[in-house]
Image: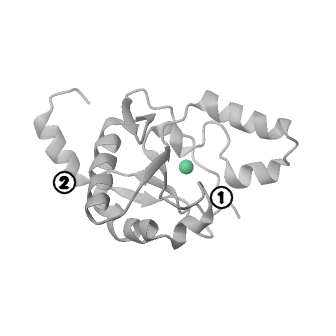
Amino acid sequence: MKTPLPIFTEEKNLMELEDEGRTFLLQPNTAESWKAMKAKAASDGIHLYMVSAFRSIERQSQIIENKKAKGIPDDEIYAVSAPPGRSEHHTGRAIDLNTVDCPVLEEEFEDTPAFEWLRENAASFGFTLSYPRNNPYGIAYEPWHWKFRGNQAFETARQSTESEPR
Ligand SMILES: [Zn+2]
């Protein structure tokens, strides 16, 4: 039995950030934690770069429609793409990552030192792997897809320096 993917609302509080010449949108705490994680990885000699971040429901619909237009069967489409409204990327808290010398969004990412580093360190920045092997959603294994689920120490530090309403 597959567990249906949850429904996500589109995050409205987004922040622009640059990564290696491209611009992305992320929920602000996620963006800050990503930057800290990238810097720590770099200091450990690990190269990480961002492939995708926030994606609107509209954009997810276009991606699905483009695949359908190419004649890709639905079961193949939905093994790798969430239906519109059910992608974690709508939350502005999910990131797809890659490293030098690895094809983008391929399972090979799990054999890189970058993935090894993430397995050991991502949790301390509040990021966890969303779709491990044999996940209950029937989504293909995605070693590159990480979601910010919050980092208590990090959020507390941020809240004490900010007065924005929540
Ligand atoms: Zn992803």
How many marks are shown on the rendered structure? 2
Res 116 label: none
Residue at left offset 70%, top offset 31%: 62
Query: Neighbour class for label 1 at 10 Å: few (<14), some, many (≥20)?
Result: some
* Left or right: 2 in relation to 119: right
Q: Label 2 to label 1, Cα distance in Å?
A: 31 Å
List x then y, in percent, for residue 46.
Answer: 36, 63
List x then y, in percent, for residue 73.
Answer: 85, 48
- The residue lying toward the viewer, choosing from 66 and 50, is 50
* Left or right: 79 in relation to 121: right
Task: Let me know if residue 135 appears in the view.
Answer: no
Residue at left offset 37%, top offset 69%: 117
Q: Quadrant of residue 23?
A: top left
Residue at left offset 32%, top offset 56%: 126
The secondary structure type at the circle numbered 2 is helix
Q: Look at label 1 and name its amino acid.
A: Ile
Depicted 20 relative to depicted 140: above or below: above
- The residue lying toward the viewer, choosing from 40 and 30, is 40
- The residue lying toward the viewer, choosing from 118 and 161, is 118
Q: Quadrant of residue 120?
A: bottom left
Q: Residue furthest left?
A: 160
Query: Which colour assignment does the render follow?
Result: one colour
Residue at left offset 67%, top offset 47%: 81
Give the residue pinned by disc 1.
Answer: 139
